[in-house]
Image: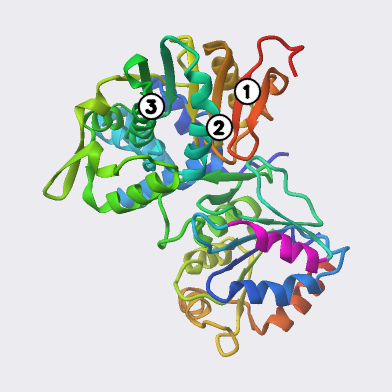
């Protein structure tokens, strides 16, 4: 397999963007996906259930020390940072907010870049702050693939624009194009 | 041939050095978190490699204590997770009421916010006068701050909201005195908390207690270390006593899953069985 994991980060407008991408992925999509969506500290996790009902892949809130498996999509719980360990397990932390956010996209992306290096795909979607830009920079520096939502079609262009300004982005695409590309990449050996 | 990442090896060596030189053992912490903290310190101190940190901590105790602060999480708040404290009031307080005196161990108390929260609940429930709360942490400077009981005014609005959501019965302002941009906790709340230095990784049992709170500490430990600390907790709680973990923590990595019943599954409140036959 060319790629071992996909990390996705998004903020405002993210729920709709995830609804456009995730249900398109087929049941045999063989790269695990780990997501940070900015949410309030006391949010209930009903939206995960909602997405799970729309998707062929299994979506769940990440548990600490959980082994990352293909066929699954893991989402950061509210009020915790989500990190990836070298041994491909998930870790949680209540460390300070980063970019005013906990969970923070940078925290996930930077730890994922360390763990997966050139076998990582980073996807940054709509959002109205600059969380994720440094994470994309690190993914790029360690040889991973970077994809940003097209700022012209994104619900909020700020987040993808911040990443485009911070580093080299390999693909700038619409949501439909992103799901198509992910499927294509998952078939590469 | 195995070609392990160089910076990963450097960090392992650094953690060995910290242990050898200062006795603090981070070797079985979750590595991603440690990496992040060390990289932050490197950037803040203008150092270029983990090896530079390594040689610096050997010669510079001030720098070493700075790094120890970096590796210790002191992020906390009063009545963090109000639903947990509501459940504590409803499900644990009635059990505590059956004892003639109560000993509570708050392990990993950081700057003390949650220990004070506990004291407030006990006071409102009429139990505080017969209670001792042992609040411990390995971070001495956090304990010193906790002991002072002085918190920033900025946080009080959020704490008051947490307190109300947790089922608080009074006005939160009854428990502190405002002074400029600070608040100081009242002596009536402070009086039965004993602050002590204790390291969960390297120290043993220090008291037999009715209740242990250790929330959002185990998430930083690997599976093996979590198992060891759970053994320490099991050995410290009396039969029928209670263990409270953080909302994402569990007994999964210990030998003790069958030794407790769940008082509140979602809020991670467990009651130690009198015997393994108890259901």
- Give the mark nearer the N terminus: 3 vs 2: 3
Could you tell me how far apart the alpha carbons at marks 3 and 1 are, in whole angstroms? 30 Å
Q: Is residue B217 located in the magenta-colored stretch of the structure? A: no
Q: Quadrant of the C terminus of chain A?
A: bottom right
Could you tell me how far apart the alpha carbons at marks 1 and 2 are, in whole angstroms? 9 Å
The answer to whether residue B130 is seen in the rendering is yes
Q: How far across and down, in percent of the image, does residue B171 sit?
A: 29, 44
Query: Disc 3 vs disc 2: which is toward the camera?
Result: 3
Q: In this image, B64 relative to B81: left or right?
A: left
Q: Is residue B191 above or below residue A91?
A: above
Q: Secondary structure at mark 3?
A: helix
Q: Nearer the viewer, residue B58 or B33?
A: B33
Q: Which residue is mark 1?
A: B227
Query: Disc 3 vs disc 1: which is toward the camera?
Result: 3
Q: Is residue A123 above or below residue B115?
A: below
Q: Nearer the viewer, residue B249 or A98?
A: B249
Q: Which residue is mark 2?
A: B221
| Circle 1 residues within 10 Å: few <14, some 14–19, many ≥20 | some
Q: How far across and down, in percent of the image, does residue B75 sit?
A: 38, 43
Q: Do the residues under discs 3 and 1 have CB atoms within 8 angstroms?
A: no
Q: Residue at x 41, y 10 (%)?
A: B101
Q: Residue at x 32, y 40 (%)?
A: B170
Q: Residue at x 57, y 51 (%)?
A: A82
Q: Which residue is mark 3?
A: B122
The answer to whether residue B47 is seen in the rendering is no
Q: Quadrant of the N terminus of chain A?
A: bottom right
- Chain letter for mark 3: B
């Amino acid at each position: 397999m060319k790629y071992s994991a996909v990390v996705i980060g998004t903020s405002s407008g993210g729920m709709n963007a995830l609804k456009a991408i995730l249900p398109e992925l087929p049941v045999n999509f063989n790269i695990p996906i780990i997501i940070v969506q900015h949410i309030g500290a006391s949010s209930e996790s009903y939206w995960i259930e909602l997405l799970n009902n729309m998707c062929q892949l299994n979506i769940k809130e990440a548990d600490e020390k959980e082994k990352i498996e293909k066929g699954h999509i893991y989402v950061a719980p509210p009020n915790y940072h989500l990190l990836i360990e070298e041994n491909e397990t998930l870790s949680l932390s209540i460390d300070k907010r980063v970019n005013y956010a906990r969970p923070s996209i940078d925290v996930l992306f930077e730890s994922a870049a360390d763990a997966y290096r050139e076998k990582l795909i980073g996807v940054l979607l709509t959002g109205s702050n600059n969380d994720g830009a440094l994470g994309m920079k690190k993914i790029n520096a360690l040889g991973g693939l970077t994809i940003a939502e097209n700022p012209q079609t994104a619900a909020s262009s700020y987040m993808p624009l911040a990443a485009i300004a911070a580093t080299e982005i390999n693909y700038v695409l619409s949501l439909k194009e992103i799901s198509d590309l992910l499927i294509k990449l998952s078939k590469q050996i | 041939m195995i070609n392990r990442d160089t910076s990963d090896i450097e960090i392992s060596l650094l953690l060995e050095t910290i242990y050898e030189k200062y006795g603090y053992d981070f070797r079985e912490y979750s590595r991603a978190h440690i990496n992040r903290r060390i990289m932050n310190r490197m950037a803040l101190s203008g150092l270029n490699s983990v090896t530079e940190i390594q040689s610096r901590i050997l010669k510079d105790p001030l720098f070493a204590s700075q790094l120890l602060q970096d590796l210790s999480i002191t992020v906390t708040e009063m009545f963090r997770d109000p639903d947990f404290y509501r459940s504590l009031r409803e499900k644990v307080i009635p059990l505590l009421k059956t004892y003639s005196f109560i000993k509570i161990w708050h392990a990993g108390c950081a700057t003390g916010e949650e220990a004070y929260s506990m004291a407030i609940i006990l006071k409102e429930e009429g139990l505080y006068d017969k209670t001792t709360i042992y609040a411990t942490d390995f971070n001495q400077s956090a304990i010193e701050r906790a002991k002072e009981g002085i918190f920033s005014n900025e946080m009080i609005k959020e704490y008051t909201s947490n307190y109300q959501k947790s089922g608080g019965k009074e006005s939160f302002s009854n428990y502190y005195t405002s002074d400029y941009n600070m608040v100081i906790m009242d002596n009536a709340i402070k009086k039965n908390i004993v602050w002590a230095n204790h390291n969960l990784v390297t120290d043993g049992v220090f008291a037999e207690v009715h209740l242990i709170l250790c929330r959002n500490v185990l998430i930083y430990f690997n599976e093996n270390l979590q198992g060891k600390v759970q053994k320490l907790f099991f050995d410290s709680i009396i039969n029928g006593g209670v263990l409270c973990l953080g909302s994402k923590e569990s007994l999964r990595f210990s030998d003790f899953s069958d030794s407790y019943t769940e008082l509140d599954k979602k809020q991670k409140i467990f009651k130690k069985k009198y015997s393994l036959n108890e259901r």
